[in-house]
Image (cartoon, rainbow, N blue to C red):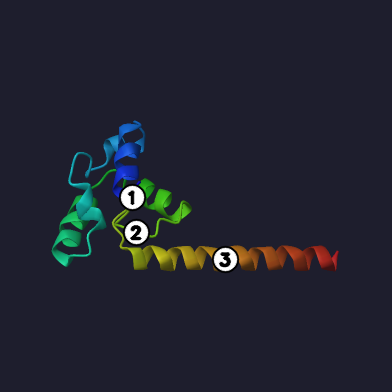
Amino acid sequence: MSVIDLVSRAWADGTWEDDAACRGGDVELFFSIEEADQAEALEFCEACPVRDRCLETAVLNQEMYGIWGGMLEGDRRRIIRDLRRRQREARKAAAARTDAA
């Protein structure tokens, strides 16, 4: 099953995606490698009322492909990398507190 099929199925489930500006749009735009398609997809995101929720879903699920929450793959990878770094630092700090106690 392709990523496009999974997204289409998620949209059919009736969740936050119901309010997405891209709902009913061409899903393939969001997974295209063509700059013109990506620019068109990002236009949907500009005024989307659920943009933050979309981005949060993509980051939490580590979506590696497509445009989510108005961000390209590389942008999300940086967010995920930073989140992992902060989680590691928090674990180290917690372990150091435990060792000191």
Q: In the image, residue 76 lies at what x, y percent?
A: 39, 62
Seen at 42% across and 48% down, the residue is 57
Give the CA distance from mark 2 to mark 3. 23 Å
Residue 3: numbered disc: 1
> Which quadrant of the rendered structure holds the C terminus?
bottom right
In this view, the residue farthest toward the front is 1
Residue 21 sits in quarter: top left
Q: Inspect the image, locate mark 1, and give the three-letter code of the amino acid beneath it.
A: Val
Residue 2 as seen in the image, left or right of residue 25: right
At mark 3, the secondary structure is helix
Q: Is residue 70 visible?
A: yes
Seen at 77% across and 68% down, the residue is 96
Residue 31 as seen in the image, left or right of residue 95: left
Give the CA distance from mark 3 to mark 1. 29 Å
At mark 2, the secondary structure is loop
Q: Which residue is mark 2?
A: 65
Frontmost residue, 5 versus 70? 5
Give the mark nearer the N terminus: 2 vs 1. 1
Q: In the image, residue 14 lies at what x, y percent?
A: 34, 31
Does residue 21 lie above or below 76 as drawn? above
Q: In the image, residue 50 lies at what x, y percent?
A: 32, 44
Residue 86: numbered disc: 3
Image depth: mark 2 or mark 1 in front? 1
In this view, the residue farthest toward the right is 101
